[in-house]
Image (cartoon, rainbow, N blue to C red):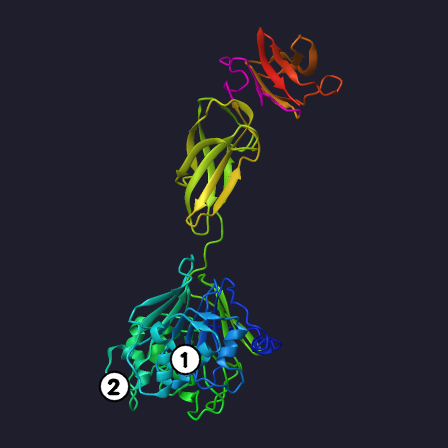
Amino acid sequence: MRQVHRLGLTALFVVALALSTLALPALAVTGNGRLQVIHMDVGQGDGAVLISPLGEVAVIDNGPGGTPAMGVTVPNQLKALGITTIKHHFASHYHSDHISGTDDIVNAGITIQNGWDRGGSYTTAAYTTYKNTLGAKRHTIVKNQIVTLDSLSTHPVFIKCVDLAGAGLSGGSEENNLCLILKVTYGEFDEVFGGDTPGFNSGSYVNVEAPASLEIGKAEVYKVHHHGSATSSSAVWLSAMQPKIGVISCGNGNSYHHPTADALSRLHAASVHTYWTELGSGVAPDPAWDKVANGQVRISATWAGAGVDSISGNGFADTFTNSGVAPDQTAPVVAVTAPNGGENWPIASSQVITWTATDNVGVTTVDLAYSIDGGVTFDGVIATGIANSGSYDWTVPDAATATARVMVSAHDAVGLVGVHASDADFAISTVASGVGDLTLAASLGVYPNPCGGGGTRVLYSVPRAGMVDVNVYDIAGRLVRRLASGSVAGGEHPLEWDGRDENGTNAPSGVYLVRLHGAAGVEKTQRLVLFR
């Protein structure tokens, strides 16, 4: 069963706030990054405002004109929203309770840039006033035409004419049979507006909902047809659309007894929670399913799949969720398993980098890089855009260092990246390591070089166990600092010089010599530049 979360905010004054600001100068409408759908209180009629995330405005019907039961005219409701320009105005059909307020809007100084309807004509004073008010701005919409708000946005709002003029049926001259059926789509959010479209063959009405249901698709919100009349909202229509929310626009004391028990029973059976602009004069609302705003019913929608939308009015603020799947916001999780600290990988040797990388949806590609400065920078490119196999055969580059690390970056399909580097330093050496390996040759390296006042790393190797001395001399050959003296095992050994002399005083900037002297004639010297 679809659930609507009811927060029960008894102190919510959405419509009361609008009423309190009617006397203030109108401000230009500003988008808030969400689609706002305001079902105006127009009494016994229909009228809704769309405010796009970027602040463009469309109106779908605008009521019968005059002052509704709750006492706020349509122009004043629009002004309270800061609306000075309506980019697109849609007339679902030509009955006066849907279009009579068009001239009131324009006479109040609000500009209508484009009007959309089914074309043709109608022999009433309300239609004539509507036609004359729009003049050359009036356009005939056609089946499957899409009108767009925020056309340059990543997430525009589409208003599609799914059907009109009786969905191909012979509906005679009955105006309700000819209604536009509009679907408003913002990403994974949809709301359907169909004016007074009938869903049953009754008198002059034909069942337009049945053929239209084959094209409508699913929608979270349904502006209930014909104010909740008995001939609206058929089970076939509701089954095709599967709405979670139904909004009923009706007027107190209306002579049609809207909304009806027949329509409400079908809506409830389809698990649709309904929200009414006014109480009407028909069936009483069921507290488990129905809420009455006595004013505007407002919807705030996000484009995201499984995103949370809200519906609010006087005394209530509930939430519901969009269709679709929530966008992926989880980056891959990565762990480098080798090299991960302490290894010695000789230059030009073939080594295997291993890692694990997982993602809630899937890792698409992996990049590998290496650092020779302990992970401060990863300027060495190993491979990019490779498969997440978990291993990579690497020919170790000629970049001898005691402070190497490898970094793995894993990418997913939406561009999120997970990164992990070796937890500790490993060595890239000029010789193979290992005590007793008689093929070893002595080596000496200093990294970084030149070095700053913070010092440098010294990496030396000897072919076998024996006595060694590692010292720093100035360019004149005077001892500056003794780094190592004594017996060591064969293999590679790291040291550090902190840039100080034997007395603990900072050595001045200049050129120094790092010298390795060992048993069996081992002699190595490296030139070092120190700067401060």
The answer to whether residue 499 of the structure is visible from this angle is: yes
User: Where is residue 106 drawn, in percent x and y?
Assistant: 44, 77
Please give the range of residues in magenta.
Answer: 429-453
Residue at left 39%, top 78%?
Answer: 133
Label 1: how many Cα within 10 Å (few below 14, some 14–19, many 20+): many
Q: Secondary structure at mark 1?
A: loop
Query: Which residue is tagged 1?
Result: 224
Q: In the rendered view of the protein, which quadrant contains the C terminus?
A: top right
Label 2: how many Cα within 10 Å (few below 14, some 14–19, many 20+): few
Question: How many numbered marks have been drawn onto this rendered protein structure?
Answer: 2
Q: Amino acid at mark 1?
A: Val
Instruction: Report the magenta stretch's main SS.
Output: loop
User: Where is residue 171 drawn, in percent x and y?
Assistant: 26, 84
Query: Which residue is tagged 2?
Result: 172
Q: Nearer the viewer, residue 249 or 285?
A: 249
Q: Amino acid at mark 2?
A: Gly
